[in-house]
Image (cartoon, coloured by chain):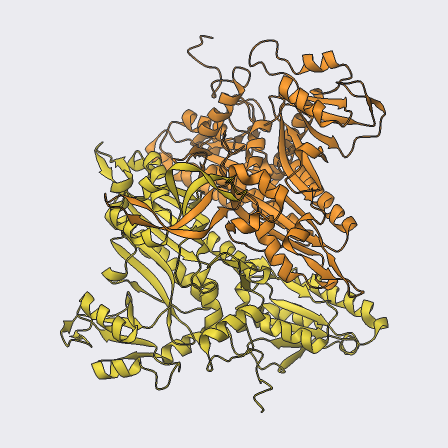
Chain colours: A yellow, B orange
Amino acid sequence: MSSKHPKTAITPTRLENYPEWYQSVLKAADLSEHSSVRGCMVIKPWGYGIWENIQRVLDGMIKDTGHQNAYFPLFIPLSSLQKEAQHVEGFAKECAVVTHHRLEKDKNGQLVPAGELEEPLIVRPTSEMIIGQSFSKWVESYRDLPLLINQWANVVRWEMRTRMFLRTTEFLWQEGHTVHATREEAQLEAEKMLRVYVEFARDYLAIPVICGEKTPSERFPGAVNTYCIEAMMQDRKALQAGTSHFLGQNFAKSCDIQFRNPEGELEFGWTTSWGVTTRLIGGLIMTHSDDDGLVLPPKIASAQLVIIPIVHAEESKQSVFSYCEKLAADLRKVHYAGQTLRVIVDKREMRGGEKSWSWIKKGVPLRLEIGPRDIEAGAFGLLRRDKPHRESTQLSASEIVHRITDILDDMQNNLLAKATAFRDQHTVKIDQKADFYDFFTPKKEDEIHGGFALCHWNGDPAVEEKVKEDLNVTIRCIPLEGAEEPGRCVITGEPSARRVIFAKSY
Amino acid sequence: MSSKHPKTAITPTRLENYPEWYQSVLKAADLSEHSSVRGCMVIKPWGYGIWENIQRVLDGMIKDTGHQNAYFPLFIPLSSLQKEAQHVEGFAKECAVVTHHRLEKDKNGQLVPAGELEEPLIVRPTSEMIIGQSFSKWVESYRDLPLLINQWANVVRWEMRTRMFLRTTEFLWQEGHTVHATREEAQLEAEKMLRVYVEFARDYLAIPVICGEKTPSERFPGAVNTYCIEAMMQDRKALQAGTSHFLGQNFAKSCDIQFRNPEGELEFGWTTSWGVTTRLIGGLIMTHSDDDGLVLPPKIASAQLVIIPIVHAEESKQSVFSYCEKLAADLRKVHYAGQTLRVIVDKREMRGGEKSWSWIKKGVPLRLEIGPRDIEAGAFGLLRRDKPHRESTQLSASEIVHRITDILDDMQNNLLAKATAFRDQHTVKIDQKADFYDFFTPKKEDEIHGGFALCHWNGDPAVEEKVKEDLNVTIRCIPLEGAEEPGRCVITGEPSARRVIFAKSY
């Protein structure tokens, strides 16, 4: 092959340049684009469709665990944000601040901010403090507990380096906020919602995640304990895909969330918060996509099937179109993953090959090409995005209708199995410092290397700092599933009770 | 009755003080509350549930008419907002402006805004300019048209006088934005989406609305034509409940949205935008509620039925609870308005009467009280929110399951019929200036008065200014359904071709 004719739809490939491959997939799949506002992205319909599916499914799971949705203000008065010292310190460097409430012409006729606010307002980077204000009014007695609330919203964190879906100035998320009467109950809640995230990532996104506890240096500002789910991307880096915080009584104290217990005494509540964001879409892309573009798990795909009418002569066009529409209508009655199937009939005027490639790049799970001869023969080639591009299965229309959910399930399972195998293949126990450094050092520049290193750690933040400085590696989490296993810290040789996961990360 | 014992659950009543009644209903139904941020409200779960239903239904209607959802940035650079002169002038007085991107301690240790932005960012009051930037990239050829996009988002307008749901600094909405190849097509789109709003308001919110065109002085800043739906509240004031704008080529020119036509020539696109907001919830409340609190149309209610177990003795508690849960489970399988029924079993420890009243105030359409004796008799009293509070229908469990959708439909229709009759009763043709002034002048302070006055108007903005100044009355719209009917302007006596609607308004 000449280098002028790339074999793949996406250039560069993952091996050639992983970060650029990621940007190319976003573009080729028409998921998103940069906006004129620094670090803010536009989520295009094909990308937003994924988010709508994530919202719908996860919203159901959040409600099934007893939570209700509500909506709280976008703005937080500076004085409120300051009430929790650690919290405000954690977010101070990345706050968008509203200082004026109108525009006015200056003497040169230029519009400038006017109407200075008495108190600056912070565009919410997270909503603990503004929701806490309401909670302090909503909670009076132990009978009001647990208080289980969720919000779907946009938040803003002024990040210095942004990357679409993975780290953007504005992003979309859900944030759960709960109050409980006891430490134990709040602790259980934080863990329960982490399990919901694990289940959602596994069963819908086909992303196998490890759940664990963050080390103290990586905790959410103000939290007593932060739990997380960590996924491995195809460049073997970790992506933190969701977090759940046990906040102890810290926020209850700063927001004055008190309740009267059955004995009539006032106590502070115990709170949690937990969230996942549009970053999940970045994780989805980097887990499953290949050098031909996006690959979407069927359960969460914006559409599961595209029907491509193949028309060579104008006179057969209408009959092919109506055959396709009829089959699409039948398929749209089929239930899959709690919804009816999402089916597109692509009638654009465009060459058939070009059309197919556009859908390969967009990652639609199934493609069905239908021409006059196929209709005559009563058999159609069904193509799967997780199989080679020309590998088709010949099926009759009724077979397609009857077997499509099985085929989608098979693809969904296949993606999860593949991602799990990849992760397991690149998860290794390392016990020697030299091996550790070797593992995280590329042999040549930009080479994909490393993975999850399961190592002993002495619990000292200085060790974390050292490996971060030397290798840009951090402790992703202390796995909840990990067994107690006495050993020696991979860096210092000091005693340790269990292994943690070290990795490079997003 | 002594004035110390109000007959109604809500004080004051509508007749006593309508604006205060409205605030009391919000509180009694637990829909919302004020936040610490000026003009921003908290939408509590019972209120947010209504918005979720509005979103779900309207989103389906928007997609059924061929639109796709996407998401665009919260912030608009000042330079972008300025590109359309009329547009920025219309919003300049109510813009929240972000000027800094972090917080820093000053010499007194106080956190203050730092990191001044090179260019101020406006928190979107509406998204024409930021979406237009993307559209100018998305549209190249006539083949890319029509471009039909919708966004669900929060927007901010710094209003001087706010009222929960009706006018808040931050509010939630959907905003549709489309580009078309011809004037006619864009014009048809603006009217089509207005019809969607009419249908949605009528069939789901049970609000009869009049659709019409705004006069030039009431147009959206930058629009060629603004259409609206107007509803009558129970104080006979008009509520603008949704708008749809034909933007001509104004925004296409300022955002450079150009396409190549089939002849290969560049043309500017023709755009529209249209939106409804959380204000619809305010309209819902003021259309149907009564002096006992909220009344919710079944199709849009956060829950349609509450089952209230009546337990007098501890030993029957479990059996009554399980009977209620069993019946609730059966009812949750029933489909109504495209969803399964939303049923609550209220097991709170509280007196039965108090419990019933709490649900009356919250406006749940149906209540079902179930005690041990009812279970024994196999008949239960079903109570409707739109009937007197003690008027119940005795039904067996299976009758309830089988007849509930008919009963809900009947209530839904009843609310629409009632609201329509009220509106028609207070819509009058007025031809004399003296009658006009009399119609809009209360006989005693704060008395509910007026309504929709169908009058001739000479087309002069000076007349609009005059009646606004004299009576605080505006032209709500030029009805689309109104027949041509020559007459004379109610104020000046000059010739006029058709009647318009004058009213006081929110």
Total marks in image: 0
Examine the rendering and report whether any part of residue B398 can be seen: no
Question: In which image quadrant can residue B173 be found?
Answer: top right
In the visual, does B123 lie left or right of B189? left
Figure check: B473 above or below A82: above
**Compared with residue A236, is residue B422 higher up or lower down, i.e. above or below?**
above
> Which sits in the foreground, B186 or B447?
B186
Residue lying farthest to the front in this orientation: A108
Instruction: Check the image and name the residue furthest to the bottom.
Output: A1
Q: Quadrant of the N terminus of chain A?
A: bottom right
Residue displayed at 44% across by 47% down: B98
Residue A215 spot, x, y in % from top left: 25, 63
Q: Position of residue A221 (x, y in %)?
A: 28, 53
| Image location of residue B278, percent across then percent down | 54, 38
Rendered location of residue A79, percent (x, y) = 31, 40
Front residue of A360/A381: it is A360
* Left or right: B417, with A443 as reference point: right
Q: Residue at x 34, y 34 (%)?
A: A137
Location of residue A406 by image quarter = bottom right
Image position of A126 with respect to B409: above or below: below
User: Quick check: can you spot residue A212?
Assistant: yes
Seen in the image, is A93 located left or right of residue B478? left
From this view, report whether residue B387 is shown above or below residue A175.
above
**Quadrant in which the C terminus of chain A appears:** bottom left
User: Closest to the observer: A195 or A161?
Assistant: A161
Looking at the image, residue B305 sits to the left or right of residue B4; the answer is right
Name the foreground residue: A30 vs A342.
Answer: A30
Instruction: Name the quadrant containing residue B241.
Output: top right
Q: Residue at x 26, y 72 (%)?
A: A469
